[in-house]
Amino acid sequence: MAKLTVTMPDDFIQKCASLGSNTDAIMGAVLKAGGEIILEKARSNLRAVIGLNTKYESRSTGELASSLGLSPPRVDRNGNHDIKIGFAEPHSGGVSNAKLASIIEHGKHGQLAKPFMKPAQSAAKSACIEAMKAKLESEVQGL
């Protein structure tokens, strides 16, 4: 019977070994790169829907849109890396930013929903994946 031995290149083995010790930092950078894409799309969508089709003139100060941001990357208790897009608190008007954003996203009695987060996720998904792939490639190349 014929025997075949395949060996991986030494530089590839070294990159894989160094990736193991730098996984958390690399995953954080990759998640941040993807999160930034969706964050900008969500912020753009939010600015577009605030004051749109309202009965009264908008009283928007821009505070809600400027409070939208990324959390630091973290590892949950199951070992999964994640990053969140959300609103910083508090809002100067006394109502939380998260509540205002939820009302805009889902609507309420007498106010139609004006989704901005879900469309941002859908529209920026492929760009987010590409940005994350590119960041991973650059991080691995830098090892």
Image (spheres, rainbow, N blue to C red):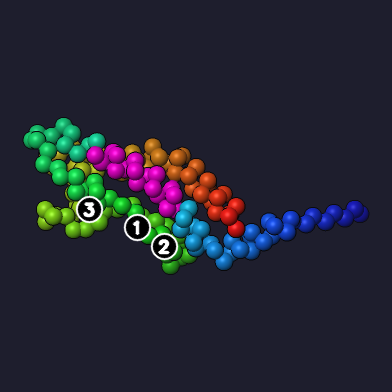
Residue type (three-letter) at the residue carrying disc 2: Arg
Q: CA distance from mark 3 to mark 1?
A: 14 Å
Helix, strand or loop at mark 1: loop
43 relative position to 54: left or right: right
Q: CA distance from mark 2 to mark 3?
A: 21 Å
Q: What residue do we see at 43% from left, 48% from top? A: 34
Specify the segment rendered in magenta: 31-47
Mark 3 lies on residue: 98
Image position of 136 with respect to 44: above or below: below
| Numbered disc in front, either 3 or 1 | 1
130 relative position to 122: left or right: right
For the stretch drawn in magenta, the main secondary structure is helix
Give 76 or 17, whichever is nearer the viewer: 17
Check whether the beta carbons of the residues at disc 1 and disc 2 lie within 8 A of each other: yes
- Viewport quadrant of the C terminus: bottom right
Q: Say which quarter of the image contains residue 38.
A: top left
Helix, strand or loop at mark 2: strand
Residue type (three-letter) at the residue carrying disc 1: Ser
Q: What residue do we see at 27% from left, 50% from top? A: 68
Mark 1 lies on residue: 71
